[in-house]
């Protein structure tokens, strides 16, 4: 029997019999199929590699895996008692990151990338002497919700203090841009994608930073502290506050052919 290396984009991999993999709910975008003289793995939505010699065995065509072998859909139920442990492992891998959306679903890709990133590069217009009005980029921890494939709100929350140099810029001009990239996750490293490779998806948001109101502070706290527990121990005398990135424009680069524009309405209406 052939085996399948189950690869969640943001998790490790483990082996499971092919029938068992079919028993888990969801869909995996990356698989490695081995057996009968053929082995390869790629993102299911990537273009096929050029043929290189002859291959043999089921799923091999011209020295590479066929599209059918490259992409495995996993659906149904884990119903076999004897396979419950392995089934649970498969589901845990799915929960760790879920399947990366296909390139034609730009809004979902934007939601996916943001939810799987723990930090981003925030660019402000500097208010500092000698730099006034010039772009100034800085790294900030962020979160749109607790880890898990269905817990992202799409809202980038931040934990800020006015002692921070970029926050001082925002007090003069709240406009900013925010970039997040799968380069910070195992996905691009697994595929050996350079951070500048379009397949190592990154998202650029433009908008403004605003403090959250009391009714939203609980959501922001849960989103941030679940991913960044150290935040709870930061000095209280720094007057930390919860803020969010108010999105007005979105650009997605996840494939060849240039940036894709996504509206905030499209972004918030999709299920990540």
Image (spheres, helix red, strand yellow):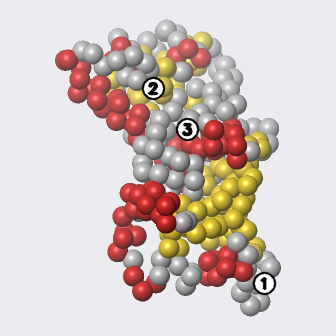
As drawn, 20 above or below 183: above
Q: Residue at x 46, y 84 (%)?
A: 238
Gap between marks 2 and 1 measured at Cα? 50 Å
Mark 1 in CB contact with mark 3 (< 8 angstroms): no
Gap between marks 1 and 3 measured at Cα? 38 Å
In the rendered image, the residue lying farthest to the left is 82
In the rendered image, the residue lying farthest to the front is 215
Towards the viewer: 41 or 234: 234
**Is 195 on the left or on the right of 6, as rendered?**
right
Picture disc at residue 132: 1
Q: Residue 259's x, y, as percent? A: 77, 44
Number of residues whose C-alpha sits closer than 10 Å to that of mark 3, classed few (under 14), some (14–19) or many (20 or more) = many
Q: Residue 148's x, y, as percent? A: 42, 43
Picture disc at residue 272: 3
Number of residues whose C-alpha sits closer than 10 Å to that of mark 1, classed few (under 14), some (14–19) or many (20 or more) = few
Quadrant, the C terminus: top right
Which of marks 3 and 2 precedes in the sequence?
Answer: 2
Q: Which residue is mark 2?
A: 26
Q: Residue at x 70, y 31 (%)?
A: 104
Q: Residue 13's x, y, as percent? A: 38, 35
Mark 2 in CB contact with mark 3 (< 8 angstroms): no
Picture disc at residue 115: none
Towards the viewer: 50 or 81: 81
Can residue 32 be seen in the rendering of this structure?
A: no
Nearer to us of marks 2 and 3 is 3
Q: Residue 215's x, y, as percent? A: 49, 61
Gap between marks 2 and 3 measured at Cα? 13 Å
Towards the viewer: 59 or 68: 68
Number of residues whose C-alpha sits closer than 10 Å to that of mark 2, classed few (under 14), some (14–19) or many (20 or more) = some
Count of marks overlaid on the render: 3
Q: Residue at x 40, y 70 (%)?
A: 231
């Amino acid at each position: 029997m052939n085996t399948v290396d189950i690869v969640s984009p943001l998790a490790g991999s483990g082996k499971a019999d092919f029938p068992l993999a079919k028993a888990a709910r969801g869909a995996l975008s990356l698989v490695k199929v081995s057996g009968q003289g053929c082995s390869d793995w790629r993102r299911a939505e990537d273009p096929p590699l050029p043929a290189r010699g002859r291959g043999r065995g089921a799923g091999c065509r011209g020295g590479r895996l066929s599209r059918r072998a490259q992409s495995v859909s996993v659906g149904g139920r884990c119903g076999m008692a004897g396979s419950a442990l392995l089934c649970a492992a498969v589901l845990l891998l799915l929960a760790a990151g879920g399947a990366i959306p296909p390139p034609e679903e730009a809004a979902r890709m934007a939601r996916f990338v943001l939810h799987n990133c723990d930090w981003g590069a925030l660019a402000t217009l500097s208010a500092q002497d000698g730099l006034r009005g010039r772009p100034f980029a800085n790294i900030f921890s962020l979160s749109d919700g607790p880890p898990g494939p269905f817990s992202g709100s799409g809202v980038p929350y931040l934990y800020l203090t006015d002692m921070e140099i970029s926050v001082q810029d925002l007090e003069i001009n709240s406009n900013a841009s925010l970039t997040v990239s799968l380069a910070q996750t195992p996905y691009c490293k697994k595929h050996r994608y350079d951070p500048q490779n379009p397949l190592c998806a990154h998202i650029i948001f433009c908008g403004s930073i605003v403090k959250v109101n009391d009714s939203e502070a609980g959501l922001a706290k849960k989103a941030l502290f679940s991913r960044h527990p150290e935040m709870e121990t930061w000095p209280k005398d720094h007057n930390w506050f919860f803020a969010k990135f108010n999105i007005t424009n979105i650009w997605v680069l996840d494939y060849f052919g240039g940036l894709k524009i996504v509206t905030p309405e499209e972004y918030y209406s999709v299920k990540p």
